[in-house]
Image (spheres, rainbow, N blue to C red):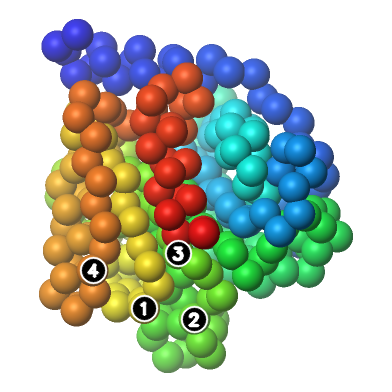
Protein backbone atom coordinates (compact mmCIF):
# COMPACT_ATOMS: atom_id res chain seq x y z
CA UNK A 1 0.00 0.00 0.00
CA UNK A 2 1.68 3.21 -1.15
CA UNK A 3 -0.98 5.90 -0.75
CA UNK A 4 -0.50 7.49 2.73
CA UNK A 5 -4.14 8.47 3.12
CA UNK A 6 -5.28 4.97 2.18
CA UNK A 7 -2.85 3.40 4.63
CA UNK A 8 -4.04 5.73 7.37
CA UNK A 9 -7.70 4.94 6.70
CA UNK A 10 -7.07 1.19 6.84
CA UNK A 11 -5.06 1.48 10.05
CA UNK A 12 -7.67 3.69 11.68
CA UNK A 13 -10.46 1.29 10.72
CA UNK A 14 -8.56 -1.60 12.26
CA UNK A 15 -7.85 0.26 15.50
CA UNK A 16 -11.49 1.29 15.88
CA UNK A 17 -12.92 -2.10 14.87
CA UNK A 18 -12.48 -3.70 18.30
CA UNK A 19 -15.48 -3.70 20.62
CA UNK A 20 -15.20 -1.64 23.80
CA UNK A 21 -14.20 -3.72 26.81
CA UNK A 22 -15.88 -3.01 30.14
CA UNK A 23 -13.64 -2.14 33.06
CA UNK A 24 -13.39 -4.10 36.29
CA UNK A 25 -14.11 -0.96 38.31
CA UNK A 26 -14.75 2.75 37.82
CA UNK A 27 -14.33 5.74 40.09
CA UNK A 28 -15.16 9.44 39.82
CA UNK A 29 -12.56 12.10 40.55
CA UNK A 30 -15.07 14.97 40.27
CA UNK A 31 -18.72 15.82 39.74
CA UNK A 32 -18.73 16.14 35.94
CA UNK A 33 -19.71 12.98 33.99
CA UNK A 34 -16.37 13.06 32.18
CA UNK A 35 -14.40 13.12 35.43
CA UNK A 36 -14.08 9.36 35.72
CA UNK A 37 -11.37 6.71 35.62
CA UNK A 38 -11.93 3.11 34.51
CA UNK A 39 -9.73 0.44 36.05
CA UNK A 40 -8.60 -2.89 34.62
CA UNK A 41 -7.12 -5.47 36.96
CA UNK A 42 -4.12 -7.50 35.85
CA UNK A 43 -5.35 -10.79 34.46
CA UNK A 44 -4.60 -13.68 36.76
CA UNK A 45 -5.18 -11.38 39.75
CA UNK A 46 -1.48 -10.75 40.03
CA UNK A 47 -0.42 -8.81 43.14
CA UNK A 48 2.11 -5.98 42.93
CA UNK A 49 1.40 -5.26 39.28
CA UNK A 50 2.77 -2.07 37.71
CA UNK A 51 0.13 0.58 37.09
CA UNK A 52 -0.27 2.02 33.59
CA UNK A 53 -2.24 5.28 33.43
CA UNK A 54 -3.72 5.76 29.96
CA UNK A 55 -4.72 9.10 28.43
CA UNK A 56 -6.62 8.76 25.17
CA UNK A 57 -6.18 10.89 22.08
CA UNK A 58 -8.60 12.33 19.57
CA UNK A 59 -7.32 15.90 19.22
CA UNK A 60 -8.91 16.83 22.57
CA UNK A 61 -12.30 16.73 20.76
CA UNK A 62 -15.64 15.46 22.08
CA UNK A 63 -16.31 12.67 19.56
CA UNK A 64 -13.29 10.73 20.86
CA UNK A 65 -13.52 9.39 24.38
CA UNK A 66 -11.79 6.74 26.45
CA UNK A 67 -13.85 3.92 24.93
CA UNK A 68 -11.59 3.60 21.89
CA UNK A 69 -8.65 2.92 24.21
CA UNK A 70 -10.33 0.09 26.12
CA UNK A 71 -8.93 -2.63 23.80
CA UNK A 72 -5.43 -1.33 24.60
CA UNK A 73 -6.28 -1.29 28.31
CA UNK A 74 -7.35 -4.93 28.09
CA UNK A 75 -4.27 -5.78 26.01
CA UNK A 76 -2.05 -4.41 28.77
CA UNK A 77 -4.07 -6.05 31.56
CA UNK A 78 -3.60 -9.40 29.84
CA UNK A 79 0.13 -8.78 30.02
CA UNK A 80 0.12 -8.35 33.77
CA UNK A 81 -0.38 -4.60 34.15
CA UNK A 82 -3.02 -2.85 36.19
CA UNK A 83 -4.52 -0.10 34.04
CA UNK A 84 -6.26 3.19 34.76
CA UNK A 85 -8.04 4.63 31.71
CA UNK A 86 -8.68 8.32 32.34
CA UNK A 87 -11.51 10.41 30.91
CA UNK A 88 -11.39 14.21 30.81
CA UNK A 89 -13.43 17.08 29.43
CA UNK A 90 -12.90 17.75 25.75
CA UNK A 91 -14.06 20.24 23.14
CA UNK A 92 -17.39 20.74 21.44
CA UNK A 93 -19.18 18.48 19.00
CA UNK A 94 -18.45 18.66 15.29
CA UNK A 95 -20.88 20.74 13.18
CA UNK A 96 -22.59 17.62 11.82
CA UNK A 97 -23.25 16.60 15.42
CA UNK A 98 -24.92 19.89 16.29
CA UNK A 99 -21.84 21.68 17.61
CA UNK A 100 -20.48 25.09 16.72
CA UNK A 101 -17.24 23.74 15.31
CA UNK A 102 -14.44 21.25 15.83
CA UNK A 103 -13.08 22.96 18.93
CA UNK A 104 -10.27 21.01 20.53
CA UNK A 105 -10.30 20.88 24.29
CA UNK A 106 -11.76 23.23 26.90
CA UNK A 107 -9.72 25.89 28.57
CA UNK A 108 -8.87 25.39 31.36
CA UNK A 109 -11.10 22.36 32.01
CA UNK A 110 -9.07 19.80 30.07
CA UNK A 111 -5.96 20.59 32.09
CA UNK A 112 -7.91 20.90 35.33
CA UNK A 113 -9.25 17.40 34.80
CA UNK A 114 -5.96 15.71 33.98
CA UNK A 115 -4.31 17.33 36.99
CA UNK A 116 -7.21 16.36 39.27
CA UNK A 117 -7.26 12.79 37.97
CA UNK A 118 -3.57 12.29 38.61
CA UNK A 119 -3.85 13.84 42.06
CA UNK A 120 -6.78 11.59 42.99
CA UNK A 121 -5.33 8.42 41.51
CA UNK A 122 -3.29 7.11 44.48
CA UNK A 123 -6.38 6.93 46.68
CA UNK A 124 -8.73 5.69 43.95
CA UNK A 125 -6.46 2.90 42.75
CA UNK A 126 -6.03 1.56 46.27
CA UNK A 127 -9.71 0.65 46.40
CA UNK A 128 -10.39 -0.04 42.72
CA UNK A 129 -7.38 -2.22 41.91
CA UNK A 130 -5.68 -3.41 45.11
CA UNK A 131 -3.41 -5.64 43.00
CA UNK A 132 -1.64 -2.55 41.62
CA UNK A 133 1.65 -1.23 42.93
CA UNK A 134 1.40 2.59 42.62
CA UNK A 135 5.14 2.84 43.22
CA UNK A 136 5.58 1.46 39.71
CA UNK A 137 3.36 3.84 37.79
CA UNK A 138 3.91 4.63 34.12
CA UNK A 139 1.97 7.35 32.28
CA UNK A 140 1.10 6.52 28.69
CA UNK A 141 -0.90 8.50 26.16
CA UNK A 142 -1.63 8.49 22.45
CA UNK A 143 -1.63 11.56 20.20
CA UNK A 144 -3.37 14.35 22.15
CA UNK A 145 -3.25 11.98 25.11
CA UNK A 146 0.49 11.69 24.59
CA UNK A 147 0.66 15.45 24.96
CA UNK A 148 -1.35 15.26 28.19
CA UNK A 149 0.87 12.49 29.57
CA UNK A 150 4.02 14.53 28.93
CA UNK A 151 2.36 17.61 30.40
CA UNK A 152 1.14 15.79 33.52
CA UNK A 153 4.65 14.50 34.17
CA UNK A 154 6.03 18.05 33.91
CA UNK A 155 3.72 19.84 36.35
CA UNK A 156 6.57 20.41 38.81
CA UNK A 157 8.37 22.56 36.23
CA UNK A 158 5.36 24.66 35.26
CA UNK A 159 5.88 28.42 35.58
CA UNK A 160 5.43 29.80 39.11
CA UNK A 161 1.84 30.76 39.74
CA UNK A 162 0.41 28.06 37.50
CA UNK A 163 -2.66 26.50 39.16
CA UNK A 164 -1.45 23.05 38.07
CA UNK A 165 2.09 23.31 39.41
CA UNK A 166 3.14 20.74 41.99
CA UNK A 167 5.90 21.23 44.57
CA UNK A 168 7.83 18.24 43.31
CA UNK A 169 7.87 15.62 40.55
CA UNK A 170 5.16 13.00 40.38
CA UNK A 171 5.99 9.54 41.70
CA UNK A 172 6.39 7.98 38.27
CA UNK A 173 8.65 5.33 36.82
CA UNK A 174 8.32 7.11 33.50
CA UNK A 175 6.23 8.26 30.56
CA UNK A 176 5.59 6.48 27.26
CA UNK A 177 4.19 8.95 24.72
CA UNK A 178 2.73 7.44 21.55
CA UNK A 179 2.84 9.76 18.53
CA UNK A 180 2.37 12.69 20.91
CA UNK A 181 1.53 16.27 20.03
CA UNK A 182 4.65 17.11 21.97
CA UNK A 183 6.00 20.29 20.37
CA UNK A 184 3.45 23.03 19.82
CA UNK A 185 5.49 25.17 17.45
CA UNK A 186 6.03 22.28 15.06
CA UNK A 187 2.45 21.05 15.40
CA UNK A 188 1.09 24.53 14.61
CA UNK A 189 3.45 24.90 11.66
CA UNK A 190 2.28 21.57 10.24
CA UNK A 191 -1.39 22.19 10.98
CA UNK A 192 -1.65 18.99 13.00
CA UNK A 193 -5.24 17.78 13.44
CA UNK A 194 -6.67 20.79 11.59
CA UNK A 195 -5.33 23.40 13.97
CA UNK A 196 -6.17 21.53 17.17
CA UNK A 197 -3.34 23.06 19.21
CA UNK A 198 -4.51 26.63 18.71
CA UNK A 199 -8.10 25.58 19.43
CA UNK A 200 -6.96 23.89 22.64
CA UNK A 201 -5.35 27.12 23.82
CA UNK A 202 -8.27 29.31 22.85
CA UNK A 203 -6.95 30.79 19.62
CA UNK A 204 -3.72 31.97 18.05
CA UNK A 205 -3.62 35.02 20.30
CA UNK A 206 -3.29 32.79 23.36
CA UNK A 207 -0.29 30.77 22.18
CA UNK A 208 2.25 33.14 23.67
CA UNK A 209 0.65 33.33 27.11
CA UNK A 210 -0.74 29.82 27.49
CA UNK A 211 1.90 27.86 25.58
CA UNK A 212 4.52 28.08 28.37
CA UNK A 213 2.00 26.43 30.73
CA UNK A 214 0.97 23.65 28.36
CA UNK A 215 3.63 22.90 25.71
CA UNK A 216 5.70 19.83 26.70
CA UNK A 217 8.65 21.12 24.66
CA UNK A 218 8.71 24.22 26.87
CA UNK A 219 8.62 22.17 30.09
CA UNK A 220 12.04 20.58 30.05
CA UNK A 221 13.95 19.03 31.65
CA UNK A 222 11.56 17.04 33.83
CA UNK A 223 13.97 14.52 35.34
CA UNK A 224 11.45 11.76 34.60
CA UNK A 225 12.36 8.89 32.27
CA UNK A 226 10.54 9.43 28.99
CA UNK A 227 10.16 7.35 25.84
CA UNK A 228 8.45 8.36 22.61
CA UNK A 229 7.13 5.76 20.16
CA UNK A 230 6.40 7.04 16.67
CA UNK A 231 5.39 5.51 13.35
CA UNK A 232 7.45 6.74 10.42
CA UNK A 233 4.37 6.70 8.17
CA UNK A 234 2.24 8.79 10.54
CA UNK A 235 0.41 11.53 8.62
CA UNK A 236 -1.81 12.54 11.55
CA UNK A 237 0.96 13.61 13.94
CA UNK A 238 4.07 13.45 11.76
CA UNK A 239 7.46 12.25 12.92
CA UNK A 240 8.78 15.82 12.85
CA UNK A 241 6.71 16.67 15.93
CA UNK A 242 8.28 13.90 18.01
CA UNK A 243 11.75 14.75 16.75
CA UNK A 244 11.29 18.41 17.69
CA UNK A 245 10.41 17.38 21.24
CA UNK A 246 13.36 15.03 21.52
CA UNK A 247 15.65 17.78 20.20
CA UNK A 248 14.23 20.25 22.73
CA UNK A 249 14.90 17.76 25.50
CA UNK A 250 18.49 17.30 24.36
CA UNK A 251 19.05 21.06 24.35
CA UNK A 252 17.69 21.14 27.90
CA UNK A 253 20.18 18.47 28.93
CA UNK A 254 17.75 15.55 29.04
CA UNK A 255 17.75 12.35 27.01
CA UNK A 256 14.40 11.16 25.69
CA UNK A 257 14.19 7.78 24.01
CA UNK A 258 12.73 7.76 20.51
CA UNK A 259 11.59 4.52 18.89
CA UNK A 260 10.69 4.92 15.21
CA UNK A 261 8.64 2.12 13.68
CA UNK A 262 9.01 1.39 9.97
CA UNK A 263 5.86 1.02 7.91
CA UNK A 264 3.65 2.18 10.77
CA UNK A 265 1.24 5.10 10.87
CA UNK A 266 -0.71 6.75 13.68
CA UNK A 267 -3.19 4.13 14.82
CA UNK A 268 -1.32 0.79 15.06
CA UNK A 269 0.26 2.03 18.29
CA UNK A 270 -3.10 1.50 20.05
CA UNK A 271 -4.36 -1.44 17.96
CA UNK A 272 -4.01 -4.81 19.74
CA UNK A 273 -4.13 -6.50 16.33
CA UNK A 274 -0.97 -4.68 15.19
CA UNK A 275 2.62 -5.65 15.94
CA UNK A 276 3.30 -2.06 17.01
CA UNK A 277 1.12 -2.56 20.07
CA UNK A 278 3.51 -5.20 21.39
CA UNK A 279 6.35 -2.69 21.01
CA UNK A 280 4.35 -0.24 23.11
CA UNK A 281 3.85 -2.85 25.84
CA UNK A 282 7.57 -3.56 25.86
CA UNK A 283 8.44 0.13 26.18
CA UNK A 284 6.11 0.37 29.17
CA UNK A 285 7.57 -2.77 30.74
CA UNK A 286 11.11 -1.43 30.42
CA UNK A 287 10.17 1.58 32.54
CA UNK A 288 7.87 -0.25 34.96
CA UNK A 289 10.18 -3.07 36.02
In the image: residue 150, left or right of residue 171: left
In the image: residue 10, left or right of residue 163: left
Q: What residue would you read off at disc 2?
A: 169
Residue 168 circle label: none
Q: Mark 2–mark 3 contact, CB under 8 Å? A: no
Residue 255 circle label: 4
Q: Distance between the residues labelled 1 and 4?
A: 9 Å
Neighbourhood count class around disc 3 (C-alpha, 10 Å): few under 14, some 14–19, many 20 upward:
many
* Residue at figure coordinates x 34%, y 15% from the top left: 9
- Vertical placement of residue 206 versus 14, above or below: below
Residue 223 circle label: 1
In the image: residue 157, left or right of residue 272: left
N-terminal-most mark, 1 or 3: 3
Q: Where is residue 250 in the image (x, y as percent from the top left)?
A: 16, 70
- Vertical placement of residue 74 versus 198, above or below: above
Q: What residue would you read off at disc 3?
A: 174
Amino acid sequence: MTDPAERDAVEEASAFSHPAIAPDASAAYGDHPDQVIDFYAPRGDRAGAPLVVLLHGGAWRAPYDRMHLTPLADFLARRGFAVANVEYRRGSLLPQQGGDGPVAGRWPDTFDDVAAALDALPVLVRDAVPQADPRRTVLAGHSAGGHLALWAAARHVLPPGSPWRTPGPAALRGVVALAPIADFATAVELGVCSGAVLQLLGGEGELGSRGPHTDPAALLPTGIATAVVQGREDIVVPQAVAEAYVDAAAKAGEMVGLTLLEGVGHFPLIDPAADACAVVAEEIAQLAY
